[in-house]
């Protein structure tokens, strides 16, 4: 009875299937025919998704690579320039700066939210398991659901000269440090970074909190019986056992930092000067205001490679620990 | 669990302060929105004469009715189609395990980390050539394509974990691949499909870059894209800009408050699986 019901479509059982099939050759032929028919139907199932993906993602991806080897203004003929565009990206101080800026944003978009998120999550876990914890979860998560554009506009106003931040600084007697934060060459990037902290902190906190609740409570119990402080518990239990969640947080936030566009575009548009220009913004400016499609594409290809190069080790590290 | 009283107080105070800091920006723009249009108020100052009319004016000048319509249109065009085609593909890859499914899976997973900025330039020229530039389709079609890596990956994770016995039992009754999909596995996949639907709706509603580059007319854009255009026009009129921002945020906030549990869970699971 069981071998009749085994179908080629459920390879979870392939090994028994194979022995049953080799015992009865005729059945094997029959199965083979079903298999072929099914695989054709199966491919029809995949086809729509594959087509949309191929036309609107893979094709543009290949075009990006193609454009990156040409000089092109978007209208006239394309001129082959080989690796010239890539060399320009690496040599032009303004373009190299965008890549450095992206990594500086990683500090604000990734490191701070993840570290602060760990602290906040463990505090919620320790002192606010009830109603307060639930409210904190919702409130902290709020900035994550609004459009990044809105976050940029809101903070554009808060960080402006008459905005809330300066008003608070004035109130506590720090009038000397007040400034138009987003218009200041030294402070614009950290200010943009602050917007990222606001947006991503809740996300990291909630994700890490779900991780903490999966940790065996007995570990915490015994630590507390030994009179462990918050700090000991944090360093010896919470952080090591959350490696996988930390990996996920880092992956998501690092991509958000390297590929940042919305917040920067709305709050500073890359300025003042070039001080907050990140690759996403620079690609947009090169392609759509300066009409240098080839150069924009070379930067785009490098951005995609950069994300892969940074993400793969994080993925590998957090997965390995799991085994 | 035993925690010292001192720690309890410090910890909870810290949380409350943190929540206040998180909320403060919303309060600030709300207060600012009530100041007379065209003035430059202080960051957190209750106006002498609250101008509730600013919201009405922002509603009119931002053309909110058209914006809402456009965003809803785009979400309705993107999400159901994406759900159907990604679920079908994931079913074939994860459950039928058709020949080549490993290659297909790799191909889709490859797109998971792809920044939209990486392909936006060719997408622009491609859409001009296809004649869909500056229409809603210019946002809808690429978004469906761009969601495929995540959506297929997400749904495959569900199908791969379905016990084989379910399909086997159906096979005994002579079910075809289509029956298996439509009658048996689709109803069983309702929960992950719902989460995926929530995720893609939020992402679509908030999509900015595609709207900015591929559609010039704000009334054909997503909510986030329209907000960008609104900012361009009213950057100097802070109270009106704040009022407009609040109006554009309202739908998102209302939906979030209503479905917060589902949305938080979906967003968290989404990143863990991705």
Image: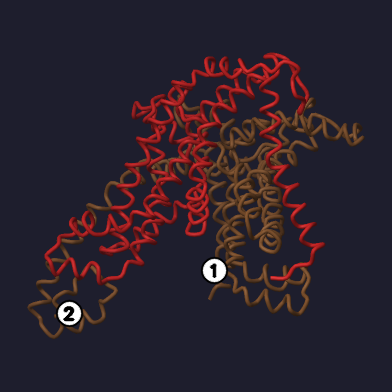
Chain colours: A brown, B red
In the image, residue A220 lies at what x, y percent?
67, 74
Q: Nearer the viewer, residue B128 or A320?
A: A320
Compared to residue A214, the image places residue A75 above or below, namely: above
Q: Position of residue B213 (x, y in %)?
A: 49, 29
* Neighbourhood count class around disc 2 (C-alpha, 10 Å): few under 14, some 14–19, many 20 upward: few
Residue A77 or B46: which is nearer the viewer?
B46
| Residue positioned 69% across, 62% down in the render | A122
Q: Quadrant of residue B61?
A: top right
Residue A68 falls left or right of residue A99: left
Which residue position is annotated with label 1?
Answer: A319
Q: CA distance from mark 2 to mark 1?
A: 37 Å
* Residue B37 disc label: none
The chain carrying label 2 is A
Which image quadrant: the N terminus of chain B?
A: bottom right
User: Eyeballing the image, is B107 above or below B137?
Assistant: below
> What residue do we see at 45% from left, 41% from top?
A66
**Residue B43, quarter of picture:** top right
Chain of the residue on which disc 1 is drawn: A
Of marks 2 and 1, the one in the foreground: 2
Residue at 71%, 73% in the rendered image: A236
Q: From the viewer's side, name the closer residue of B179 and A184.
A: B179
Helix, strand or loop at mark 1: helix
Query: Secondary structure under badge 2?
Result: helix
Residue that carries the numbered disc 2 in the rendered image:
A2
How many badges with numbers are in the image? 2
């Amino acid at each position: 009875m069981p071998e009749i019901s085994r179908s080629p479509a459920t390879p979870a059982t392939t090994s028994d299937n194979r022995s049953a099939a080799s015992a009865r050759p005729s059945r094997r032929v029959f199965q083979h025919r079903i298999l072929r028919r099914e695989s054709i139907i199966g491919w029809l199932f995949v086809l729509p998704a594959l087509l949309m993906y191929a036309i609107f993602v893979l094709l543009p991806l290949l075009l990006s690579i193609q454009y990156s080897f040409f000089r092109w203004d978007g209208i006239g003929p394309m001129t082959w320039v080989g690796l010239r565009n890539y060399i320009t990206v690496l040599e032009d101080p303004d373009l190299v700066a965008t890549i450095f800026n992206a990594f500086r944003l990683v500090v604000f978009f990734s490191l701070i939210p993840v570290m602060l998120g760990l602290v906040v999550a463990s505090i919620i876990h320790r002192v606010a398991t009830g109603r307060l914890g639930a409210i904190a979860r919702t409130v902290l998560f709020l900035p994550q659901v609004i459009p990044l554009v809105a976050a940029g506009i809101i903070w554009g106003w808060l960080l402006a000269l008459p905005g809330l931040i300066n008003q608070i600084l004035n109130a506590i007697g720090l009038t000397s440090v007040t400034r138009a934060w987003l218009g200041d060459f030294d402070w614009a990037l950290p200010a943009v970074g602050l917007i990222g902290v606001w947006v991503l902190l809740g996300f990291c906190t909630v994700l890490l909190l779900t991780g903490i609740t999966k940790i065996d409570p007995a570990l915490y119990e015994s630590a507390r019986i030994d009179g462990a402080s918050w700090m000991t518990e944090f360093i010896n239990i919470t952080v090591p056992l959350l490696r996988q969640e930390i990996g996920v947080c880092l992956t998501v936030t690092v991509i958000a930092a390297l590929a940042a566009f919305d917040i920067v575009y709305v709050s500073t548009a890359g300025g003042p000067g070039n001080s907050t220009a990140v690759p996403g913004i620079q690609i947009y400016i090169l392609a759509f205001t300066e009409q240098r499609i080839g150069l924009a594409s070379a930067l785009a290809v490098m951005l995609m490679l950069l994300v892969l190069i940074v993400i793969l080790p994080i993925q590998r590290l957090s997965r390995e620990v799991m085994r | 669990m035993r925690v010292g009283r001192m720690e309890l107080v410090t910890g909870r105070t810290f949380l409350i302060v943190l929540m206040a800091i998180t909320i403060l920006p919303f309060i600030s723009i709300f207060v600012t929105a009530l100041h007379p249009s065209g003035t430059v108020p202080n960051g957190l100052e209750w106006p002498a004469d609250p101008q509730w009319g600013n919201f009405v004016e922002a509603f009119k000048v931002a053309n909110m009715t058209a914006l809402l319509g456009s965003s809803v249109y785009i979400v309705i065009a993107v999400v159901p189609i994406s759900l159907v085609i990604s679920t079908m593909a994931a079913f074939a890859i994860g459950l039928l395990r058709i020949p080549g499914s490993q290659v297909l899976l790799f191909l889709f997973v490859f797109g998971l980390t792809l920044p939209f900025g990486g392909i936006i330039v060719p997408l622009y020229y491609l859409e001009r050539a296809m004649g869909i530039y500056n229409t809603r389709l210019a946002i809808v079609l690429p978004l469906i394509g761009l969601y495929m890596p995540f959506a297929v990956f997400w749904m495959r994770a569900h199908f791969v974990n379905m016990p084989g016995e379910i399909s086997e039992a159906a096979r005994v009754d002579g079910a075809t691949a289509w029956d298996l999909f439509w009658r048996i596995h689709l109803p069983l996949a309702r929960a992950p499909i719902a989460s995926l639907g929530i995720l893609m709706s939020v992402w679509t509603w908030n999509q900015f870059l595609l709207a900015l580059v591929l559609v010039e007319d704000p009334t054909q854009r997503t909510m986030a894209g329209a907000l960008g255009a609104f900012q361009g026009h009213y950057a100097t009129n802070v109270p009106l800009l704040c009022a407009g921002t609040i109006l554009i945020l309202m739908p998102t906030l209302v939906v979030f408050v209503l479905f917060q549990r589902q949305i938080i869970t979906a967003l968290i699971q989404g990143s863990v699986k991705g």
